[in-house]
Image: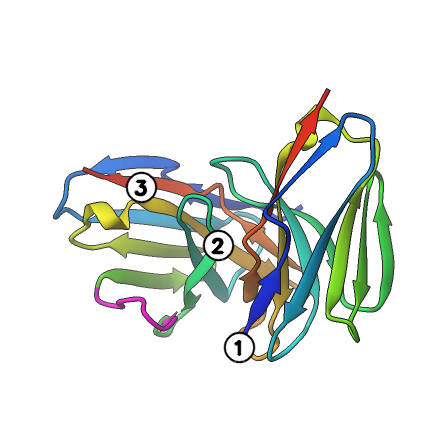
């Protein structure tokens, strides 16, 4: 079956660093995405990893280990506006291009 | 960057009526579009894959006669919720892939059936 796990909730302090982990077990793998979703809004794209290693993009970095079925999203210099849900999604090559299997999301609360 | 426009953003309808949701790719052609549904505090769940010029592919458990999908052009897919009931109240989101590395999302439609 398909299974994507990430913590339900996390809390961090403004200015700090937070790491959101994601583990996956899927029948196929064609890349892993991280999305940010504010309440009541559509997800917005943050990062894409298909090869092992770290991808850095400003305050956000994403890491992938395919052998371990593991990824994390690292947020630095946290701001209040980073309070949102962060969705880990795996593109299953067994499905149509672009078909994504989503985890339940991690609700991040950034406190002053 | 690529933009996907979804309309309406919010709709309230009476039980038993039908609601149409549109999803447009504004600056690229999308032969495939995906329709997701998200209940409160739950993950996005794929409902169906919309294919331009052919029948949509529905995920297990999704009633194709209730959720009608039409993908008549390379830039427009529509989802019609027929004979809506309160349990159909949800957040519906479409997405369209561009290339191999990104899937762009519409703004989402909050459907409330009363």
Is residue A80 left or right of B71 when viewed as pictured? right
Quadrant for residue B29, please give it: bottom right
Residue under numbered circle 2: B44
Frontmost of labels 2 and 1 is 1
Residue under numbered circle 3: B111
Residue range corresponding to the magenta coloring = B57-65
Q: Nearer the viewer, residue B31 or B38?
A: B38
Chain identifier of the residue bearing label 2 in the image: B
Q: Secondary structure at mark 1?
A: loop
Frontmost of labels 3 and 1 is 1
Are labels 2 and 1 on one chain? Answer: no
Q: Quadrant of the C terminus of chain A?
A: top right
Is residue B69 left or right of B37 when viewed as pictured? left
Q: Residues within 10 Å of mark 1 (few under 14, many from 20)?
A: few
What label sits on residue A1 in the rendered view? 1
Q: Residues within 10 Å of mark 2 (few under 14, many from 20)?
A: many
Is residue A37 left or right of B33 when viewed as pictured? right
């Amino acid at each position: 079956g398909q299974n994507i796990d990430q913590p339900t909730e996390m809390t961090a302090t403004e200015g700090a660093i937070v790491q959101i982990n994601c583990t996956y077990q899927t029948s196929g793998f064609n890349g892993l995405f991280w999305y940010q979703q504010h309440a009541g809004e559509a997800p917005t794209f943050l990062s894409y990893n298909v090869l092992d290693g770290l991808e850095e993009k400003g305050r956000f970095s994403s890491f992938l280990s395919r052998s371990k079925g593991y990824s994390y999203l690292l947020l630095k210099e946290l701001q209040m506006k980073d309070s949102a849900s962060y969705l880990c999604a795996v593109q299953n090559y067994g499905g149509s291009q672009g078909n994504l299997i989503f985890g339940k999301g991690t609700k991040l609360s950034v406190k002053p | 960057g690529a933009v996907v426009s979804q309309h309406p953003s919010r709709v309230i309808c009476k039980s038993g009526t039908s609601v149409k949701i549109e999803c447009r790719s504004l600056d690229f052609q999308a032969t495939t579009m995906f329709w997701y549904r998200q209940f409160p505090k739950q993950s996005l769940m794929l409902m169906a894959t919309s294919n331009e010029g052919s029948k949509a592919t529905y995920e297990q458990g999704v009633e194709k006669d209730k959720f009608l999908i039409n993908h008549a052009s390379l830039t427009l897919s529509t989802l019609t919720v027929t004979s809506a009931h309160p349990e159909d109240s949800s957040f519906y989101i479409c997405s369209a892939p561009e290339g191999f590395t990104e899937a762009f999302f519409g703004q989402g439609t909050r459907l409330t059936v009363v």
